[in-house]
Image (spheres, grey):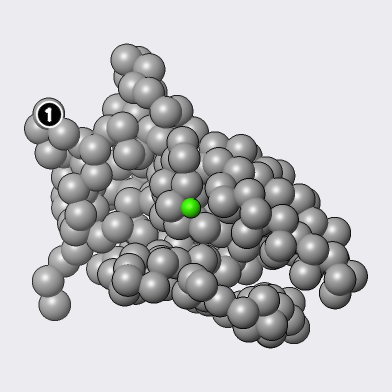
Amino acid sequence: MRILVVEDERTLASFIEQSLRAEGHAVTLCHDGPSGEAAALTGDYALVVLDLTLPGRDGLEVLDSIRARLPELPVIVLTARAAIEEKVLALDRGANDHVTKPFAFEELLARVRSQLRAPRQRTSSALESGDLSADLRTRRVTRGGEEISLTAREFELLVYLMRHPDQVLSREQILNAVWGFDFDPGTKVLEVYVGYLRRKLANGRDEDPIETVRNVGYRLRVPRA
Ligand code: CA
């Protein structure tokens, strides 16, 4: 199996590489967030081992971007012993498993084996918010049970909003996660896509699930039960 290891501590990365190779896997190493993210999104890997503190781009953001585009790719995150919140955040955001540093390589290998054996539905493939639902595997979106046809980019935008319900997301965060920009291009691309998405989601309804937060960005409203 081809495994991607994203870890900036080079000594540790090469030990991980050696132990995975010894198990018969082909291993690619990346030492920073942006190159790890780009490699993961090629779709060439069966599994990603992802450190969370990385130069260039935070591991959690890399995880978000993998989850938005390759929802079924198993990701095992490496976290520091003290960082309990980090571990919880990573699992909430769709990591399949985690290993706390320092770890025995046997432990990592056992978790890798278990992920590679697991059926590919370990992460929930359906996101729900109010009457909206998005299936990450089939890319089918419905509102109130009615199917809504979205383009690939509209789908990614909606999924990113649905992964952060009720959370105010800045324009920069959204542009970064959905378009991969690490700067605000100063264009109206985001506004334009939010407009498309609103029109399609409205589908004869008054209630707009996407709230504009002035001077910041957007928020997906979650209806109170
Ligand atoms: Ca690190």
Secondary structure at badge 1 equals loop
Label 1 beta carbon less than 8 Å to ligand 1: no
Q: Position of residue 136 (x, y in %)?
A: 54, 62
Q: Position of residue 180 (x, y in %)?
A: 49, 33
Q: Which of 63 and 157 is in front in this view?
A: 63
Left or right of residue 179, residue 203 in this image: left
- How many numbered markers are drawn? 1
| Picture residue at 16% right of the left edge, 34% below the top | 216
Disc 1 crowd rating (10 Å Cα; few below 14, some 14-19, many 20+) is: few
Q: Which of 108 and 145 is in front in this view?
A: 108
Q: Can residue 109 be seen in this view?
A: yes
Above or below, 201 relative to 216? below
> Looking at the rendering, in which quadrant would you find the N terminus?
bottom right
Q: Position of residue 61 (x, y in %)?
A: 42, 49
Give the residue type at disc 1: Asn
Q: Is residue 65 visible?
A: no
| Picture residue at 49% right of the left edge, 71% below the top | 101
Q: Position of residue 127 (x, y in %)?
A: 41, 68
| Picture residue at 31% right of the left edge, 32% below the top | 172
Reading the image, the residue beneath label 1 is: 215
Above or below, 146 relative to 205? below
Left or right of residue 207, residue 103 in this image: right
State the image quarter where residue 195 is shown: top left
Judged from this view, the residue extending furthest toward the right is 24
Left or right of residue 106, residue 77 in this image: left
| Picture residue at 47% right of the left edge, 47% below the top | 54
> Looking at the rendering, in which quadrant would you find the C terminus?
bottom left
Above or below, 81 relative to 211? below
